[in-house]
Image (tube, rainbow, N blue to C red):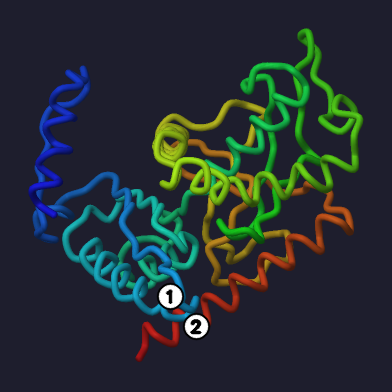
Amino acid sequence: MMPVLDGVVMELQDCALPLLREVIPTDQEEVAFKDLDIAILVGSMPRREGMERKDLLKANVAIFKSQGTALDKYAKKTVKVLVVGNPANTNCLIAAKSAPSIPKENFSCLTRLDHNRARSQVAMRCGIPADNVKNVIIWGNHSSTQYPDVHHCKVNIKGKEEAAFDVVKDDAWLKGDFISTVQQRGAAVIKARKLSSAMSAAKAICDHMRDIWTGTPDGEFISMGVYSSGNSYSVPEDLIYSFPVTIKDKSWKIADGLPINEFSRAKMDATAAELVEERDTAVAFLSA
């Protein structure tokens, strides 16, 4: 893959980016991970036809165990690690467990793409720009069990903030097709262009990292897959689970105290159950 990587380097150079100083293409862990401030782990084993989920988990445990070990050995202890490669939540957990000297809070997985998809769906439905929609939430796994939740979402219409449910005025859509559209969006993109999301995923990675670095605006939370231990929403411990978070001084905090109704609770529990199963399978491979 090194010649392919050289092509990517050429493209980066040809963008004439004002903030880009140097690109070091490498296939050596000790070069790639040395003294990192940020690690974005994009590569993972994709699911192939006829492949069982446990086979996929086994292949990815090997990848993220080695990357976690390399982070532990070479990166700064303050490194912020974002896992993008799927299954992102469980891959992130394996990397974190393989890097015991780096705080678990420094690891997160990407659910910002799902967050942006949810935000955009609400905006299109209301006929407004996406930045007039805030506080959608993605709960749980970056998979088709994720729960896109708009019960706390605010929509800015003509300078006035209102609840999304009051503006959309279509509870059946918000509790039905809206959720399934966001859950299945990745598959829909693959079906349409025969390749997985590229530009939208890259944009979501930038959004995620920018918010870690510069913080979230007052009164606003975003979605990130983070360590679940000590959360106030009865989500099982020792998972990487997507929560609404606020960020200040490069530290995230789960947005506590949001009321959760029965509809939401059931969906939050279902995605947690999938993550518990993934974790238990992956951890068994990790110690094998």
| Above or below, comparing residue 134 to residue 50 in the picture | above
Residue 123, located in which quarter of the rendered image?
top right
Q: Nearer the viewer, residue 271 or 249?
A: 271
Q: Decide: is 85 above or below 130.
A: below
> Residue at horizontal 81%, vertical 13%?
160
User: In the structure shown, which secondary structural element does the residue marked by tag 1 occupy?
Assistant: helix
Q: Find disc 1 in the rendering and name its residue.
A: 57
Image spot of residue 91 (x, y percent): 41, 66
In the rendered view, does 264 fall on the left or right side of 21? right
In the rendered image, residue 207, in percent from the top left (x then y), is placed at 46, 33
Residue 135 percent across, percent down from the top left? 69, 35
Judge the density around disc 2: few (<14), some (14-19), many (≥20) Cα neighbours within 10 Å: some
Query: Callout 1, which amino acid?
Result: Leu
Q: Is residue 144 left or right of residue 89?
A: right
- Measured in 3D between alpha carbons, the distance from the residue under mark 2 to the one under mark 1, in whole angstroms, is 8 Å
Give the amino acid type for the residue marked by disc 2 in the picture: Thr
Which residue is labeled 2 in the image?
A: 281
Q: Is residue 42 left or right of residue 261?
A: left
In the rendered structure, the answer to whether residue 192 lies left or right of residue 6 reads right
Quadrant containing the N terminus is: bottom left
Q: For mark 2, give the secondary structure.
A: helix
As displayed, is residue 162 above or below residue 184?
above
Is residue 50 in sight in this rendering? yes
Would you call the spot at circle 1 few (<14 residues within 10 Å), some (14-19), or many (20 or more)?
Answer: many
